[in-house]
Amino acid sequence: MCPKTGREMNKSRFEAFSDGVFAFAITLLILGVVLPEARYATNRELALALLRLWPNAIAYGLSFAVIGIMWQNHHALFRLVERVDRRTVFLNLVLLAGTAFIPFATSTLGTYPTMQAAAFLYGVALSFCATAYNLMLSHLVASRAFHANVSPAAIAQTVRAYRFGWVTYVGAMLLALVAPVVSFAAYVVVALYYLIPRGLDADM
């Protein structure tokens, strides 16, 4: 057990606030699935309008999975962290700022799924979050914030998994400038990759 430094923050409040932002962001996603402002005279017209929302529905599903996985990773990480300092709080706020932006990027991607700008914006949001995650993890490792029983091997595996996500998100973001549909597929691949527990997450 490391001695108190006077710069440590309340870990329970830190986690509760983070959970609230993740929950709020994941709830906002559904607001991006909206019918065009028009009156539909027949059931067929309404059905066709609903079917045309399929890109929004796919973007919603992807982002729901992304934020859900981010929350799971956050929980897996901080259940093994012994103390939280001011720098951790700051980096976590940066992460949460990016998370809160995901619903807007999702709505844009769902509305304009084949446009480079929409896919690029989505990549910017996810790459921003991945960057914040990696910086926060690096700080936790450097400051030895983990419990003493956490193995270095598990931490190293977690670092590799986080870096893989960052590299893939950045690559998909740049790919969006020339092939937005392919970049969308890359975002799905990253979500599927993180569905398999790795590192600290594997012990849950």
Image (cartoon, rainbow, N blue to C red):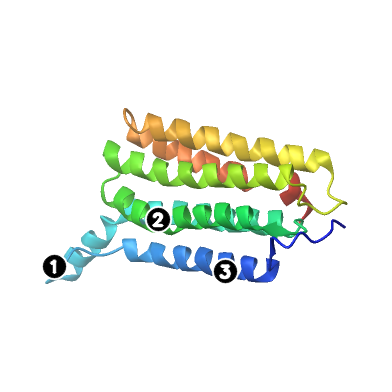
Q: Residues within 10 Å of mark 1 (few under 14, many from 20)?
A: few
Asked which secondary structure carries label 2, the reply is helix
Residue denoted by label 3: 17
Residue 36: horizontal and vertical position, in percent? 19, 63
The residue sitting at the top extreme is 178
Q: Residues within 10 Å of mark 3 (few under 14, many from 20)?
A: some
**For residue 11, above or below residue 147:** below
Residue denoted by label 2: 101
Q: Nearer the viewer, mark 3 or mark 1?
A: 3
- Measuring 17% from the left and 64% from the top, which residue is drawn there? 45
- Measuring 69% from the left and 60% from the top, which residue is drawn there? 7
Q: Would residue 144 be found to the left or right of residue 110 on screen? A: right
Q: Which label's residue is closer to the chain start, 2 or 1? A: 1
Q: Is residue 47 visible?
A: yes
Residue denoted by label 1: 38
Q: Amino acid at mark 1?
A: Ala
